[in-house]
Image (cartoon, helix red, strand yellow):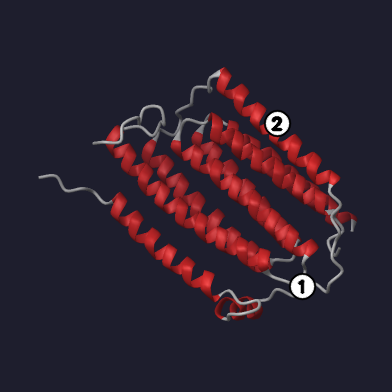
């Protein structure tokens, strides 16, 4: 049990530190790499919760897909060694006030709420169960959202191609 | 619970991650870094869904599938957003939100 807790502390410290660095770093490529670290630590937390499939999805889709996409667009739109100017002081203060007060509010609410851990037998989330749930309906079936998300992905794909296409000029 | 870690620890981590995203969204001026802040917020919400599912309702799978769909929506959103950002860069030669202040082109 103790080793488990040490691993959790390491990964949650990684998440907090690197997410703060992501939003404060003044070099955009570094911010993207810090985001990558945050996403990898998040997938480690999913592994700790015993959701192996979702952790793998997180690794391949976020860490492998979205971060690469972001780094590509960073390289297309800005110089690598360009440094942002620091945001205006007033903006920083407003942002910090919003973040600090919001997190204090949420954390006090969380710590005062008694969470009753369920004693149900945890379900073994294996690929068989996930695949069958995605194509069944009724109780514990998710066929409708699955179809919706496939239409959404198709629409997003077409939209991305149309928007990024070069417009022909006469 | 089987992990030996109180549920509040996970929730506090996710909260700090979410509000880091809020701070970044408020202070950043570059569109790509704003997109990165949004990704941070989506991830924090995902952690919450999974933790509630595992600790409070381990016999069901609602949180698991909801976060699966959130990941899919986030991927679609990132693709469209980056297409838009590249188009904006083509028209304005900049992706700073304060310089892109006209909708016509």
Residue sitting farthest toward the right: A2
Where, quadrant-wise, is the N terminus of chain A in this rendering? bottom right
What is the x, y in percent for residue A72? 42, 46
In the structure shown, which secondary structural element does the residue marked by tag 1 occupy?
Answer: loop
Report how far apart the C-alphas of labels 2 and 1 lie in the structure.
35 Å
From this viewpoint, is residue A124 visible?
yes
What residue is shown with label 1?
B59
Other residues around mark 2 within 10 Å, as few (<14) / some (14–19) / many (≥20) = some
- Residue A41's place in the image compared with A93, above or below, is below
Q: Is residue A108 left or right of residue A14?
A: right
Residue at 61 percent across and 28 percent down: it is A95
Q: Position of residue B79 (x, y in %)?
A: 42, 53
Say which quarter of the image contains residue A48.
bottom right
Q: Position of residue A39 (x, y in %)?
A: 62, 50
Q: Nearer the viewer, residue B54 or B102?
A: B102
Residue at the spot 51% in from the left edge and 31% down from the top edge: B28
Residue shown at 74% from the left, 46% from the top: A12
Q: Chain of mark 2?
A: A
Q: Nearer the viewer, residue A113 or A13?
A: A113
Q: Measured from the top left, where is residue A61 in percent x and y? A: 53, 59
Q: Farthest top residue?
A: A89
In the image, taking residue B9 as reference, residue B84 lies left or right, namely: left
Q: Quadrant of residue A56?
A: bottom right
Residue projecting furthest to the front = A138
Q: Residue at x 56, y 23 (%)?
A: A91
Q: Residue beneath label 2, please?
A: A100
User: Is label 2 on the same chain as label 1?
Assistant: no
Indicate the quadrant containing the C terminus of chain A: top left, top right, bottom left or bottom right.
top left
Q: Badge 1 sits on which subunit?
A: B
């Amino acid at each position: 049990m103790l080793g488990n807790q040490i691993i959790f502390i390491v990964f949650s410290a990684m998440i907090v530190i690197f997410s703060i660095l992501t939003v404060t770093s003044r070099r955009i490529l570094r911010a993207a790499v810090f985001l990558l670290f945050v996403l990898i630590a998040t997938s480690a937390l999913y592994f700790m919760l015993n959701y192996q499939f979702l952790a793998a999805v997180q690794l391949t889709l976020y860490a492998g897909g979205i971060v690469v996409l972001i780094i590509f667009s960073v390289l297309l739109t800005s110089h690598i060694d360009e440094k942002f100017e620091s945001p205006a002081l007033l903006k920083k203060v407003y942002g910090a006030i919003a973040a600090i007060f919001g997190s204090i509010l949420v954390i006090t609410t969380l710590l005062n709420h008694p969470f009753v851990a369920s004693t149900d037998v945890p379900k073994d989330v294996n690929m068989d169960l996930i695949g069958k749930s995605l194509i069944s309906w009724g109780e514990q079936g998710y066929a409708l959202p699955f179809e919706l998300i496939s239409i959404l992905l198709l629409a997003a794909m077409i939209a991305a191609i149309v928007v990024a296409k070069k417009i022909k000029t006469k | 619970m089987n992990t030996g870690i109180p549920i509040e620890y996970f929730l506090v981590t996710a909260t700090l991650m979410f509000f880091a995203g809020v701070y970044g969204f408020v202070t950043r001026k570059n569109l790509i870094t704003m997109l990165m802040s949004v990704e941070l917020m989506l991830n924090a919400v995902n952690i919450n869904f999974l933790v509630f599912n595992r600790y409070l309702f381990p016999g069901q799978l609602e949180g698991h599938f909801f976060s699966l769909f959130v990941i899919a929506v986030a991927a679609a959103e990132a693709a469209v957003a980056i297409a838009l950002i590249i188009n904006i860069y083509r028209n304005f030669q900049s992706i700073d939100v304060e310089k892109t202040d006209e909708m016509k082109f």
